[in-house]
Image (cartoon, helix red, strand yellow):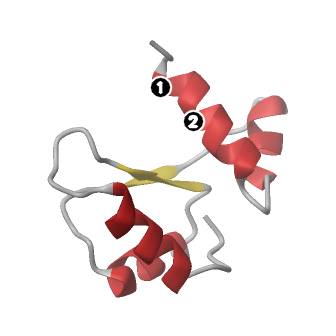
Amino acid sequence: MLSPLVISLLVLAQAADASGLLKMMRGEKVTGGTFFGSTDPVTYCAMANAGYDFIWNEMQHGSRDWEAVARMWRTCPHAKA
């Protein structure tokens, strides 16, 4: 099982703007937000552009599936996080 830190690094590395990953490599603070319980793309886009370095899409403890997450990501393709 991958640790949360490794998963976060993989998520950051896949981002179009890997500034969060670069911050971590320099030992700087990285701030993330957890998107939990909602499937509303507008809410996701607002969070993804609110200044976080990454957004954690919590799926283990909710009822969302990958299609709902993909719909949110497609709605906000140029999000900063």
Residue assigned mark 1? 4
Name, please, the residue furthest toward the front: 67
Which element is circle 2 on?
helix
* Figure check: 46 above or below 25: below
Residue at x-position 31% and y-position 47%: 58
Residue at x-position 47% and y-position 25%: 4
Q: Which image quarter holds the C terminus?
A: bottom right
Q: Residue flagged by tag 2: what amino acid is it?
A: Ser
Q: Residue flagged by tag 1: what amino acid is it?
A: Pro
Residue toward you, 77 or 24: 77
Q: Position of residue 54 (x, y in %)?
A: 57, 54
Q: Position of residue 6 (x, y in %)?
A: 60, 23
Name, please, the residue furthest toward the top: 1
Residue assigned mark 2? 8
Which element is circle 1 on?
helix
Q: Residues within 10 Å of mark 2 (few under 14, many from 20)?
A: some
Q: Position of residue 44 (x, y in %)?
A: 40, 74
Lateral position of residue 66 relative to residue 37, left or right? right
In the rendered structure, find residue 64 and report the number of the disc placed on it: none
* Figure check: 47 above or below 62: below
Residue at x-position 44% and y-position 81%: 46
Q: Are marks 2 and 1 in contact (CB under 8 Å)?
A: yes
Q: Quadrant of residue 72?
A: bottom left
